[in-house]
Amino acid sequence: MVNSLTQTQRSAELSSALLSVFLDRAADLPLRKGSKPPSAYVSLSVRNVSYKSKTATSTSDPIWDEGFSFLVKRPHVESLELQVKDEGGRACRVGVAEPAPHPAAGS
């Protein structure tokens, strides 16, 4: 397995930042058809690096309690995309979250 945080000197662009994400929980996710709670997981991606959280089975209030790290080449341009999906049956998107920018980012 290749560690996605390993960077060689031959890389076209060197990374300039490390983004650490802690995935805690979600609340009040919508129910599936038939009033069944979703089996939710989160897809996280920055540029061409993606991760998938563990699946929280049959709950509208999942708790993941997981950490992820990304090497970011251009921190002012690249963004983190989070998608909450339901794995029960077929993977369908339950929602998308966009993190709020850090207060210092606008200065």
Image: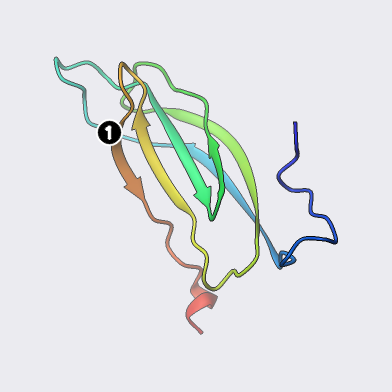
- Is residue 97 positioned above or below 26 on the image? below
Q: Exactly how many numbered labels are in the figure?
A: 1
The image shows residue 38 at horizontal and vertical percentages of 30, 22
Splitting the image into 4 quarters, where does residue 76 fall? bottom right
**Quadrant of the frame with the N terminus:** top right
Q: Going by the image, does 12 lie left or right of 9? A: left
- Is residue 24 positioned above or below 15 on the image? above
Splitting the image into 4 quarters, where does residue 89 fall? top left
The image shows residue 28 at horizontal and vertical percentages of 27, 33
Q: Going by the image, does 12 lie left or right of 63? A: right
- Is residue 48 positioned above or below 56 on the image? below
The image shows residue 98 at horizontal and vertical percentages of 39, 55
**What is the basis of the colouring in this image?**
rainbow
The residue pinned by badge 1 equals 28
What residue sits 54% from the left and 77% below the top?
104
**Residue with the most extreme bottom position:** 107
**Residue with the most extreme right position:** 9
Please tell me whether mark 1 sits on a helix, a strand or a loop: loop
Q: Going by the image, does 95 lie left or right of 52? A: left
- Is residue 15 positioned above or below 35 on the image? below
Q: Which amino acid does label 1 sit on?
A: Asp
Splitting the image into 4 quarters, where does residue 65 fall? top right
What residue sits 34% from the left and 16% below the top?
58
What residue sits 22% from the left and 15% below the top?
36
The image shows residue 83 at horizontal and vertical percentages of 39, 42
Neighbor class of circle 1 (other Cα within 10 Å; few <14, some 14-19, many 20+) is: few
